[in-house]
Amino acid sequence: MRGSVKIGRVAGVPIKLHWSFSLLVLLVVLANPHGTWATIWPMVVWIVVLFASVTIHELAHCMVARRRGLTVNDIVLLPIGGVSEINGLPAAPAIERDIAIAGPAASFALAILLGVAALMAGDRIWPPALLAGPLLVDLAWMNLVLCGFNLLPALPMDGGRVLRAVLAGRGDPLRATRIASGVAVVLGAAMVVVGFRYDIWLVFIGAFVVVGANSERRVARVQASFNGLRVGDVMAHDPTTVLSSVTAQQLLPWLQAYPGRAVPIVENGRYLGLAAVEDLIAHPVATVGEACDKTAPVLDASQPIFPAALEAFSQFPRNQLAAMSGGYVVGVIYRWTVQAVARQSRGPVAATQPGG
């Protein structure tokens, strides 16, 4: 997520803080305009331990996702909670259900552990306390609230993902997302209305739910448009390959005649990297073997367009990626071809390549 700063790594997962988190700090200061450090530090401690609980909740999602074969990018902490950025979601219904339920399950388990620890420390856990009781009691109840709130059937929260997974397991995934996102929009709008009367934070959370639900609906439409399509179906086949010993000055005029085009660079018959005009201009006196982009992800021609190609383009700032099969480069897939398919509701589209 853009605008995030890495603050650490837990179990191999980068933990990032979104810039909007500074708004939470600002609210704490504004809520105590005449406060001293002695009055403010308990609130700071509360925020730290609360978001430690949120991080545990998100880590549970990430660990299950990894066990199901998905790739975890990071966890981003926001003022209203956390977001796990996982490649491949929405996955198969059963996988999405397992990943979604892991977070609330972790929060519930943490609530029980904290409650037991509070009892052992001699604290009273009843009646409920969120901000007025001992720290362990407050955290136990807050994690229980976190569990229950996330189980609301509103995308993109965990309960909404469970609802979508259950509906998708019985039929059309796109219809499942439409139903789940519709429920989320209603609940999100209700939160906004209630929040304006009782708690401004509920307004922010409701707005987040509405925006997230609409985003999930758009992603589902894109996924439906790519249904059954693989990289090999939309790539430009049998691309011209160029030996790594050719100079950038020799290849540059040819590429400039076909704006946007890229060619695979090979060395001893093996794929080395991808070269476009911008790569050669950046290294005008080099060979193409030295100038080509060797860091760009390489797709397998048999991979599905969704999510493999979409995620590769979203994570890497190139308009072209190479496609391989059997150890050989067999095509180049272009961002605009994928975007053209995304605008279609169904059916394959002919692969296009700049310059014909």
Image (tube, rainbow, N blue to C red):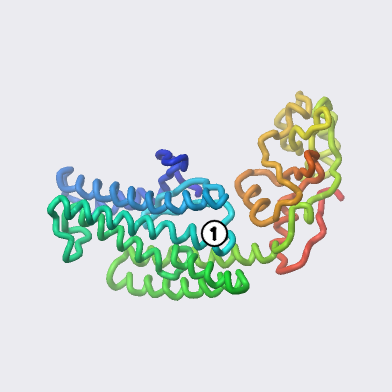
Does residue 249 show up?
Answer: no
**Residue at 78% in and 55% down:** 234
Instruction: Tell me the residue at 16%/58% (across/down).
Output: 132
The residue most toward the left is 122
Residue lying at 76% horizontally and 38% vertically, measured from the top left = 276
The 10 Å Cα crowd at callout 1, few under 14, some 14 to 19, many 20 or more, is: some
Is the residue 244 above or below the residue 231 in the image? Answer: above
- Image x and y of residue 303, in percent: 71, 51
| Side of 92 relative to 240 (left or right) | left
**Residue 290 at x, y = what percent?**
73, 26
Count of marks, rendered view: 1
Q: Is residue 252 left or right of residue 96?
A: right
* Residue at 53% across, 60% down: 96
Residue 333 seen in this snapshot: yes
Foreground of the two, 256 or 233:
233
Q: Amino acid at mark 1?
A: Ile
Residue of label 1: 95
